[in-house]
Image (cartoon, grey):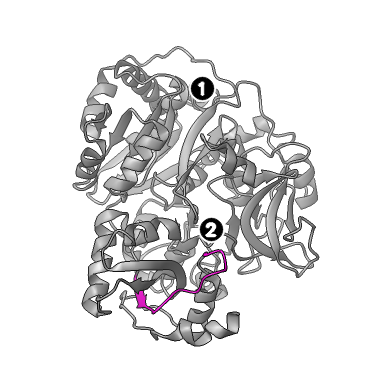
Amino acid sequence: MFATRFLKKATFDDYADYIENGAPIVPENFNFAYDVIDVMADESPDRVAILWTNDAGEKRTFTFRDLSEMSNAAANYLRSRGVERGDTVLLFMRRRWEYWVLMMAMHKLGAIPIPSTNQLKCEDIQYRIQTADVKTIIAYDDGVIWNEIRQAMGDQDVTLIGCDELDVGIDAAPRTFERVPNKNEDTMVLYFTSGTTDMPKMVAHNYTYPLGHINTAVFWQRLNDGDIHFTLSESGWAKCSWGKMYGQWLAGATVFVYDFGGACPSFELMRVISENRVTSFCAPPTAYKMLIREDASNHNLATITKADVAGEALNPEVYERFLSMTNVKLHEGFGQTETCVMLFTNQWMEPKPGSMGRPAAGWRVTLLDDRGRPVDDGEVGEICVDISAGRPVGLFQEYYKNEKKTASVFRDGFYHTGDVAYRDADGYFWFVGRNDDLIKSAGYRVSPFEVESVLMEHPAVREVAVTGIPDQTRGMAIKATIVLTKYCQPTDALKRQLQDHVKKRTAAYKNPRVIEFVDSLPMTISGKIKRALIRRLDSAKDTIIDAKDTIIDTTKSAINRVRGDEK
């Protein structure tokens, strides 16, 4: 296992030993592409790094020698197209195999990739181009994203490279590349992540970030040499870095990639797991909810020996049914786009269904009240990381070009996650919710502000509040509570029109599946929307969305009826 080169010990006796000695050791001027991929290519050139297939039946296998040489060629090609050290590059690659080659190439070149989902629309892309000063976009044309990118580019000086053009360039370019020096603190990758009171912000990770995922892959996912690991995420999300690249290769595992368009039916997921003899699987609870409803008798899932879950709270019933189905215990983990895994159920712990587990090595996690004081077991507090003695490996560097936002989360010797939880007497953490109202739906993190901004563009909308409500399939569904402009009538036809408006302007996963029309929104004295009150009202109505995305009518005057209770 290559990861042991960056650890004090090769094996650990128990959780206490791991906590004391399991934090990664970071060399100076570390670069994952040179110091891991190229070294593995020299030492084990024929070892398989990636098993790739897609929904059209195509298959590709890439060894570490392939990945090393092809990333050199891609770095040469990108340089020939004007990409240099420090340049930001937007990637829309879905789950195409070229993504992994490009990421290693840009690490070598010193360019800064910005992985992005193909579900984004013109306005989403335009915002990213302008905010990150993007001059190059590389995209797989899935029949939709290309037009959205073209519209977003407009007459700006931006180069667009498609996969076909990229493949030709890689084939023709030299397969050697002279090392470009970097420092550990240099920005290596950017991810856009959402907030509730502002537009998406850029999370900047430096060159030490891959080593933080030793905790993710070696100790949470419990991977070893020879494992075939399958994380469901597409390349546009930080979960891809968590589960399909850095830590898995450090653990000695092969990364399995299934590239598909749209949603992947559960029976199809079972088929690819069975046919490719996947040994380790990681996905959000939504995927497991799908799997446990399927008849597993037609597919052999016996190769799976490890399964992990993250992205939202796990229902104990899902845990028990998956255990009954596979005899495999789900191990939960918790982290953010800003981190690697920071809480998880490890090999020395018995899983408690619904618990995030205990802290990872190097992560001094505590729960603080609103005055910054530690809370007792059983009490709810904000999940914070003590950085007074140094930052853990894998914690982000900053919000790129946003000093004010960076300072708001790094204060008083702690990193403030904005998530709240409680800790039980055994030291297990239990997720409660989100301080800033982010909605987690089917593994996606959705900012109310983004959806509200789009809805406010519609002439029928005077005011709007976006919240999450329970959804049997997704965990949470997006709900828009809307005050209409004068003379507009609250009809089902208008609901559908508003949903179509959102679908055309932003990513599909942000679409409000429930719309409620009200006379007014609950506000604080300073004019801020009381989203917490709206959520409580919805909870009191016991509104649950079914799997068919039915538009459910709710009581128009509900907020007004209880407004007096909030005074």
Boundaries of the magenta span: 513-527
Position of 463 relative to 166 (above/below): below
Pointer 2 or 1: first along the chain: 1
Residue 414 located left or right of residue 439? right
* Amino acid at circle 1: Tyr
Residue 104 located left or right of residue 485? right
Position of 134 relative to 72 (above/below): below
Q: Does residue 444 show up?
A: no
CA gap, disc 2 and disc 1: 30 Å
Q: Residue furthest top?
A: 178
Q: Determine if the magenta segment contains residue 524.
A: yes
Q: Secondary structure at mark 2?
A: loop
Residue 310: mark in rendering:
2
Q: Does residue 286 show up?
A: yes
Which quadrant is the N terminus positioned in? top right
Residue 117 located left or right of residue 372? left
**Most common SS among magenta residues:** loop
The residue that mark 1 highlights is: 34
* Residue 98 location (% of width, % of height): 33, 34
The quadrant where residue 314 appears: bottom right
Position of 541 relative to 74 (above/below): below
The residue sitting at 60% across, 31% down in the picture is 208
Q: Secondary structure at mark 1?
A: helix
Q: Residues within 10 Å of mark 2 (few under 14, many from 20)?
A: many
Q: 44 or 245: nearer the eye?
A: 245
* Residue 121 location (% of width, % of height): 28, 49
Position of 536 relative to 141 (above/below): below
The residue sitting at 40% across, 40% down in the picture is 115
The quadrant where residue 132 appears: top left
